[in-house]
Image (spheres, rainbow, N blue to C red):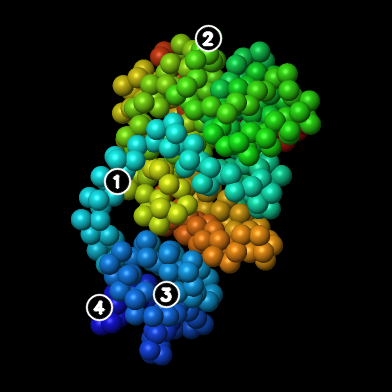
Amino acid sequence: MKALIGVIDRVAAQRGDMAFSVRLWNGERRTYGTGPEDVAVRLKDRRTALGLLANPSLRFGEAYVAGDIEVEGDLGALMELLLRVARGDLAPGLLHRGLAAVTRWARRNSPRRSRRHVAHHYDLGNDFFALWLGETMAYSCAYFRHPSDDLDTAQEQKFRHLCEKLRLEPGQTLLDVGCGWGGLAAHAAAHHGVNVVGITLSEAQKRHAEAMIAARGLGGQVEIRLADYRELRPRRPFDRIVSVGMFEHVGQALIPAYMAATARLLADGGVGVLHTIGRMAPAPIDPWIGTHVFPGAYFPSLGELAEAMGDRDLAIADVEAWRLHYALTLDRWSEAFEEHAPAVAGQYGERFVRMWRLYLRSSAAAFRVGNLTVWQIQFTRGENNNLPLTRDYLSAARTEAAGS
C-alpha cells in the first residue's frame, strides 16, 4: 500500500491546482489540494490497487468498468490529471511495451480480422449510436468554428470543409473509404453532383446508409458496398478519395499497404483527403482502449504517414491538426450519451455504460492534454499544380455557404 500512496502523492504534487480525495479499501481517506473537491476516488480492494501498480492504464479501465473503482465528480478531470502526470510513474514498463509491439505484429489486420474488429465496435446497433451521434450519424471529429457550435452544425461544417478540400466537380467519382453511416457520401452527392462509392465493413452501417440515401433520392449517385479497401478492383481509378475516421483501424504494420492501395485506386493527378486520429510521435495505443474498445487500432504519427505516402507518389499538399476539435466533439457525445444512459443500461447493462462513459471521457481528456490529435491531410496522386496556393478558397466557401 505504501507504493500506491507514494504514486498518489507524486501525482498530487504535480497538480496542486486540483482538489481530490482517494479513499482506500481499509477506510483510510487521503485528501489533496485546497478548495471544493473536484473528484473523489474510492478503491474497493487491495487486489485493484496492486493491479494499478502493475499495469495502470489497463487495470484502471477494467476496474472502473467492473465497479471496483468508484469515481464521484468530474471523471474527465480525473483522466486529464492522470494523463498529465510523469510518465515514469504511470506508464507501462519496457516489458509491457515490448509485449504490446509483438502482439500488434502478430495480430495484423487481415481482411477477416478487420471485419471482426469492426463488428466488435460498430455493429452494436444503429439505434444505440443514434442516441448520441446526432442527426448526421457522423462518428468522427467535427469541425467547430466556435466552441458553442452544436454537434450537428459542427459535423455539417466538417462535411463542407472536406468537400472543398477535395475540389469536387459535378460528374466526378469519389471513393469514401470507411463511409460509416453515409453522411459525407450523401452530402458530397447532394451538394457537389459527384458519384460516390462508399465502403464499410459494418453490415449495420450499410443498412442505415442505404436507407438514408434512398430516402434522400440519391440512389442513382451513391452506392454503398460491404468491402475492404484491399479488395476493390474498379474498372478505372477514382477522381477523388476521402477517408474519415477509418485509418485508425488499419494498423501500424499495414500503413504501407493502405497507401499502396490508395495510390492504385486514385487517378493520376487526383485529389484525396485523409482524416485520422494520430500522435505527435509513434507510440502503442492505450492498452485498455486497444483491448476493450478498438481492437486492432493504431494512431499514426505524421512522420509515419508522410513517409508511407511519399514512397507511393502521394504528394502532401496541406496538413491541419484538429486536436481540440475532437475534444469538443467528444464533449457533445458524452453529454448526449449521459442523457440516454438509463436506457442504454436497460438494454446493454451497467458495465457497458461504464465502459462507454470512460471511453468518451478519457478520449476527450487525451485530446485536451495533447497526447492525441487529428491529422487532416490533403494530397494528390503524382503531380497536380492546379490546387489553390493558399487556403483562401476555404474562407470563400464559408462566406458563400453563410449567404445561401
Residue at 38% in and 21% down: 260
- Amino acid under disc 1: Thr
Q: Are marks 1 and 2 in contact (CB under 8 Å)?
A: no
Mark identifier at residue 3: 4
Mark identifier at residue 17: 3
Counting residues from the start of the chain, the first of labels 1 and 2 encountered is 1
Label 3 sits on a secondary structure element that is loop
- Amino acid under disc 2: Arg
Front label number (3 vs 4): 4
**Callout 2 environment at 10 Å: few (<14), some (14 to 19), or many (20+)?**
few
Counting residues from the start of the chain, the first of labels 3 and 4 encountered is 4
**Callout 1 environment at 10 Å: few (<14), some (14 to 19), or many (20+)?**
few
- Amino acid under disc 4: Ala
Label 1 sits on a secondary structure element that is helix
- Pointer 2 residue: 236
- Pointer 1 residue: 103
